Each structure stands twice: as C-alpha cells, then as structure tokens.
Amino acid sequence: MMKLILVRHGQAGPYCEDDAGRNLTHFGKIQAKQTADFLAELTKLDSVDVIITSPYHRAKQTANIIFEKLNDVGQSPKLMVLNGITPDDDPGVGMREIDNAISPEFNEQTESLTVIVVCHMPIVARMASMIDGLPPAFFELAECRVFELPFIRDGLAKQITHFIPNQP
C-alpha cells in the first residue's frame, strides 16, 4: 500500500499582496519542525521516497524543514515542486499532477511509495476529501494526515494517523 501524507504549511506572515511570497514565521518554523520530528519517527521503517511541495514560499520552507530532518535521520527523499497545488487550485487537477509526477519517476511502482505533499488550505482539505470520500475537514497549521491507499484514486484511501503541532 502507498502512504500519502498530506501536510499543511506552518504559520506564515500576515496576508499581503504577494501571497506566494509569504514566509513562515518563527513559530511556523517551530511547527514545521514538530511535524518533521513526527514524520521522521513515523517513517523510520518505511522511509519517505518523495516530498512534493507547492511553489509558495511557506510551503517550500515547511517541505525543506521536513526534508532536512529526514536527511538527518538517514533518509534521502527526492524533493519536487508542483505548481498545481496552491491554495485555490482544483484538487482533482492537483491529485492528477501528483500522480503524474510520481508514476514515471518511480517506474509505475507507486503502490509501495511513501509520499509527502506539502500545500495549503483549502486544497489540502479538498484533496483529503477526494481520496478518502469524507467531507472536507479543516487542517490546522502544519498538521499532517497519513493515508494508506493502493494507488491515487478517489475514495480509496484510509486515514491511519495524524499529527497536529502546537497551535498559536
């Protein structure tokens, strides 16, 4: 079974005209580290194959904190940026882009992968809803939800655990 881990970025600076350029706050970096620590412990037996992130700064910063932690514990995931998983993107398109990014990269052997996707509200909640068939549920800052599924398709996932770091 594939593990798909959906993560919302940590706390970012205030809304501004350049939404894509917003950075994590100091507290947001702490949240991302707490999530990274959880994920490193969770994946010590099934190491992470790839981390996919939105191109927005706050998501990339969160993904990099997770990436660095996993590298520190001996994992070597690939880090990829996908443009179609920003806040207002279509979740169906986003899931197809994720599937299209990992399938050729891993020679169609996606059923045994562990994939982390770092993005934003509301798309992260909508993607979770698509894969598990439940109504969309709000993700807290830097929250991660871990799903098992045979492959990326609507309604086939089962959430197996989750983690919520400290909140403001």
Image (tube, rainbow, N blue to C red):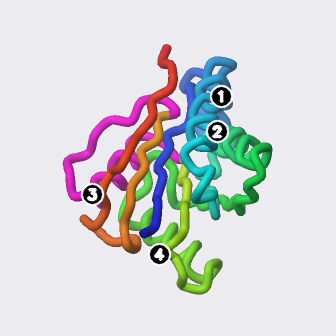
Q: Earlier in the sequence, mark 2 or mark 4?
A: 2
The stretch of residues the image draws in magenta is 119-142
Q: Is residue 85 magenta?
A: no
Q: Which residue is mark 2?
A: 62
Mark whose residue sits in front, 4 or 3: 4
Q: Secondary structure at mark 2?
A: helix
Q: Is label 2 in contact with label 1 (beta carbons under 8 Å)?
A: yes
**Residue 108 percent coordinates (x, y):** 54, 84
Q: Is residue 126 left or right of residue 118?
A: left
Q: Which kind of residue does numbered mark 2 sit on?
A: Thr
Q: Which kind of residue does numbered mark 4 sit on?
A: Glu
Q: Is residue 137 magenta?
A: yes
Q: Is label 4 in contact with label 3 (beta carbons under 8 Å)?
A: no
Q: Which residue is mark 3?
A: 132
Q: Secondary structure at mark 1?
A: loop
Mark whose residue sits in front, 2 or 3: 3
